[in-house]
Amino acid sequence: MMSVTENPNKRLKELADGVAEQIKKKKNPDVKLPIRTLSNTYFDEKSGLVRLGDKVSHRTYLNIAHTRKFMQTLMVASECKKIIDQNVTTSIRDLYYALKRTIPGTNENTVEDQSESDPIIEDLEAALDTLRERLHLQADRKGYIAGPLVVNDSGDKIDATKMGSSGWAIPSNVEPEMIKFEKCTADYVLVIEKDAVWQRLNQDKFWRDHNCLILTGKGQPARGCRRIINRLHNEMKLPVYVLTDADAWGYYIYSVIKQGSINLSFLSDRLGTPEAKFIGLTTQDVDKYDIPKNVTIKLNKGDIRRANEMMKYVWFKPKEWQHELRHMLKVNHKLELEALSSKGIKFITEKYLPRKIEEKDFLP
Amino acid sequence: MMSVTENPNKRLKELADGVAEQIKKKKNPDVKLPIRTLSNTYFDEKSGLVRLGDKVSHRTYLNIAHTRKFMQTLMVASECKKIIDQNVTTSIRDLYYALKRTIPGTNENTVEDQSESDPIIEDLEAALDTLRERLHLQADRKGYIAGPLVVNDSGDKIDATKMGSSGWAIPSNVEPEMIKFEKCTADYVLVIEKDAVWQRLNQDKFWRDHNCLILTGKGQPARGCRRIINRLHNEMKLPVYVLTDADAWGYYIYSVIKQGSINLSFLSDRLGTPEAKFIGLTTQDVDKYDIPKNVTIKLNKGDIRRANEMMKYVWFKPKEWQHELRHMLKVNHKLELEALSSKGIKFITEKYLPRKIEEKDFLP
């Protein structure tokens, strides 16, 4: 396995040399790729991460079913080498356009649309054991951080206590060679599903009163956001608490932050944070915090099906989660973070969160 | 008309006093609201803005068709006064939750969902001639700026030349009492539809080489983003150039930045920038810049209908726009900004934009 900080150019060259060698020997050119489907994914109880198994597929040139993808794999690899050599970064959409052309003498295009090039990028990440970001590719970014953290981004020092109402916007690429942690005196990281709630906490300077970092991923966090949570936990040794809506979607967001996701299982080590804890909301909070019943939302069929499915997932097996999911089905409602506002605008920062943290009232 | 910087509390109080007065006199309580539909909207050629007409409707308490909305109008006004007095800000979703309750002795809720409270907020903005942001309400935010601009946000000085790969994230509320421009030495603002393209320009430090601000709204810009473009133009006297895809959606984004939108026509003065110019892409650029034909995208039925509709809009009447729309229909394709990458990753920053600006090759 390549070290995380290694330049993937060496591996790209090995891949290309292997193919060139096969051609010189008049063999059928072939590249080996890990299989990235549910059938080759498992939950590793020891690490607490969703992981990729060791099944490998062969993509060969002289196989009509593979030829197009084989060509695309080498084109993507070659374009990545080019942009790494130029020391520039590009978006996965740009990469698609840079590759697209009509093959001379045919009506065939090299790639038809972006849904063809994106999975090839993930194949290469898995095959080279690297990150898209190290291949100098970036995708959508979203998410913000505020609190006692100073980062260095390409020579610019950014102090996340001095970013006004904005916060520091989390870039697409937060690998250590791009983003260095210069100073961090926070006691923990609070990850918040919704930006509106983050803005509320930032306005109340929750991060100052509680000496923590507040981070929002704006819904399901982008990769840059999951990676920075992972780095803050592993490098800065910060506990991670996750605050989402009390619904299946919120619990799913938590599970992806904690143990990774199936389609990116080859990156769980770098994107997952198995020690993360769930701070709320839960449907049990309604009684515990005396939240008015009229701000709860009745479960629909999809919610009920999803809750039943989640009860069967290995990572929701701990008794506390089984209890919460059963409770949700019993009371037949869910609720959003904004529901806490019915107790007053500052209830979340002055009552709810401090009591949760004080009582260590977390789900595992 | 209230001055833009005036605290809307005075107007909120007048509204409430008016209703209280009517009740004391045993009259049917009534509030006057501007009509915010297409029928009361017009294009003001002189200012170049979409504007609200002067038709007014009455919302009265003793009219079964109005009673519910009348109650909601006063509830929203009262909640706004409360949060302004507390000097806190809240989200429009939080406001909805803060208002929601069951009316005692009935099965009726004050508001059923957020689609009931959001238009009431816009009614109040129009009636009080103020901005949602001045009522201490915020909505979704997105968008980033980089370049020679220093702002002061609640006492924090933020230098947009020192924000690494992130840029300064544009907050929801960018009114002058929140965001002060401390220093700006840029020559112009380049507004970019797509964040991926913004990231490319930021990485090449386009803003340094061309002494400009680069700003992305990530698709259709949020209100905060449109407002800051307006302020940079009016207060800092910066020309504004807009760069979008060469398609109906891109041209629509440009038109909203330039002359405002119908549903927020009462805010066009504050959100529109009629002097903005369109820098590209156009379908005519394909020949002019020798862009490969295989990265253009064939128009679908919706594109064709939309282009024909747009040719009839007053604000697309200038001959240059009529020519471009006719040209798009003739060549029967559109193209995205990323298409420029087929000429090389740095083509946009090193060739396309410098030549466009040098030749002043803009659409009005």
Image (cartoon, coloured by chain):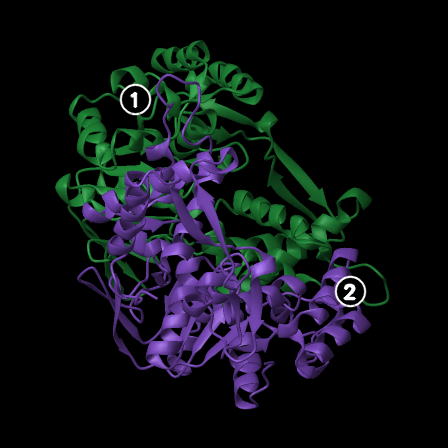
Chain colours: A purple, B green
Quadrant position of residue B297: top left
Residue B130, horizontal then vertical, whole percent: 47, 47
Residue under label 1, please give it: B291
Q: Residue at 49% of width from left, 79% of height from top?
A: A275
Q: Is residue A193 left or right of residue B28?
A: left
Quadrant position of residue A60: top left
- Mark 1 chain: B
Quadrant the N terminus of chain A occupies = bottom left
Nearest the eye: A289 or B49: A289
**Which of label 1 and label 2 is nearer to you?**
1
Residue B142, horizontal then vertical, whole percent: 42, 50
Nearest the eye: A81 or A330: A81
Q: Residue at 30% of width from left, 19% of height from top?
A: B285
Can residue B1 be spotted in the picture? no
Up-down relation of residue B77 to residue A286 (above or below): above
Residue B164, horizontal then vertical, whole percent: 24, 57
Residue under label 2, please give it: B102
Badge 1 crowding class, 10 Å Cα cut-off, few under 14, some 14 to 19, many 20 or more, is some
Can residue A340 be spotted in the picture? yes
Q: What SS does tag 1 mark?
A: loop
Badge 2 crowding class, 10 Å Cα cut-off, few under 14, some 14 to 19, many 20 or more, is some
- Mark 2 chain: B
User: Of the residues shown, which amino acid type is indicated by label 1?
Assistant: Ile
- How many numbered marks, from 0 up? 2
Q: What SS does tag 2 mark?
A: loop
Quadrant the C terminus of chain A occupies = bottom right
Q: Is residue B91 left or right of residue B166?
A: right
Nearest the eye: A188 or B231: A188
User: Of the residues shown, which amino acid type is indicated by label 2?
Assistant: Thr
Q: Is residue B164 left or right of residue B88?
A: left
Between the C-alphas of marks 1 and 2, the distance is 61 Å
For the residues beneath circles 1 and 2, the answer to whether they share a chain is yes
